[in-house]
Image: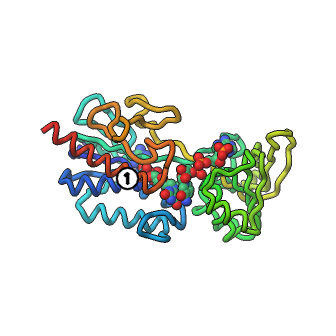
Amino acid sequence: MTETLHTRTLIVGSGPAGYTAAVYAARAMLKPVLVQGIQPGGQLTITTEVENWPGDEVVMGPDLMERMERHAASVGVRVESDHIVEVDLRSPPFAVYGDSGCRYSCDSLILATGAQANWLGLPSEEKFKGHGVSACATCDGFFFRGCDVIVVGGGNTAVEESLFLTNFAEKVTLVHRRDQLRAEMILQERLFSNSKISTLWDHELVEVLGTSNPKSVTGAHVRHKLTGTITKLNCSGIFIAIGHSPASQLVADQLEMLPGGYVAVDPGTTRTSIPGVFAAGDLIDSIYRQAVTSAGSGCMAALDAEKFLSSQA
Ligand code: FAD
Ligand code: NAP
């Protein structure tokens, strides 16, 4: 028989938005349940140093997220190791279904499912994923000791991944489709002053090259965006760092959405198009997408949920 777990406030997601919402909801005596998803701790668990979390000059991403989980547990949040596969938002109490077989029912729902890495969509990229093509240098950089690697992208993630990879790789080539990075200046300065990193401007990756047996990457074809000239680069690893997309598939057909797949909320709030359903973090944020802004909107979501529940009493 399917177990049903009822709660006044269910929080889906265990990144900075989810854990912050959970702490505030618990302190508001809402006895929240938080479902962690397949990436407990969220995106910061795949990075190393975080240098812009106020109060910590430097903190390791995974450590910060462990601390958030402990904080949530210490104020009485029930943390569930489950992944939500379906939600029914037609009328409260909302029905939420976990991969574990558990059915959750809740009077208010906070969605904090964050974002996931984007891929280029090349067949050769798909073929070599996990065999030399990765979207996580922190996870896979270690396998490329003494090798040449490529990083694709021009944002903070691409620059941080490039810098991190210099701990292992012999040479890192950052391939970017324009001649200007969008990464923060402080990161750009570190990148340009690192002798192990070179940049290839105005180029796009068009094909991952490799062997089939065993499956491994040997290089890449990159195309000059303006001239069309194709160049072969030799490398053993390719890191795709071209941004993230909001994880909104669960609710895309039930809530009002914004272009790009972000969940729409009333300006200055976390209220979605369905009363009692709130959204926070990268899921609603196409602009800032930071740990601290996610935590901030997680706080707002818990306060908005509390206000909603009081108005229903
Ligand atoms: P996320 O952290 O994305 O967490 C989403 C959560 O939702 C996860 O726990 C996941 O398991 C869960 N989830 C998803 N789908 C489901 C589902 N169906 N059921 C249940 N749970 C689900 N920001 C900074 O401020 N400073 C930095 O230094 C920094 N470095 C970064 C480095 C990298 C490599 C990356 C990728 C991002 C970095 N960011 C940084 C951005 C920051 O990580 C994000 O802005 C922040 O994590 C977003 O928090 P969130 O809670 O909205 O979502
Ligand atoms: P991002 O800022 O959206 O940058 C994505 C990069 O990939 C851009 O340079 C973009 O090029 C390029 N790109 C996108 N699609 C591409 C494609 N199909 N082919 C080739 N290149 C493509 O993503 P991000 O770097 O992952 O950062 C996401 C968010 O997390 C940001 O808000 C960022 O500030 C935050 N973050 C913060 C930190 C930090 O504070 N230290 C660290 C990591 C991430 P264009 O520039 O041409 O658009």
Count of numbered circles on the image: 1
State yes or no: Cβ of the residue under disc 1 lies below 8 Å from any atom of ligand 1.
Answer: no
Within the image, what quadrant is residue 86 found in?
top left
User: To which residue does mark 1 refer?
Assistant: 296
Asked if residue 277 lies left or right of residue 125, the reply is left
Residue drawn where x is 34% and y is 41% of the image = 269
Q: Is residue 126 visible?
A: no
Residue drawn where x is 48% and y is 53% of the image = 290
Within the image, what quadrant is residue 71 found in?
bottom left
The image quadrant where one finds the C terminus is top left
The residue lying toward the viewer, choosing from 179 and 101, is 179
The image quadrant where one finds the N terminus is top left
Q: Amino acid at mark 1?
A: Gly
Q: Is residue 249 visible?
A: yes
Question: Residue 95, percent across and down?
Answer: 28, 37
Question: Residue 34, percent across and down?
Answer: 31, 52
The residue lying toward the viewer, choosing from 176 and 129, is 176
The residue lying toward the viewer, choosing from 206 and 128, is 206
Asked if residue 68 lies left or right of residue 238, the reply is left
Q: What colouring style does the render use? A: rainbow
Q: Residues within 10 Å of mark 1 (few under 14, many from 20)?
A: some
Relative to 265, does residue 67 appear above or below in the rendering?
Answer: below
Question: Residue 264, percent across and down?
Answer: 41, 34
Question: Residue 298, percent across and down?
Answer: 35, 50
Residue drawn where x is 49% and y is 70% of the image = 58
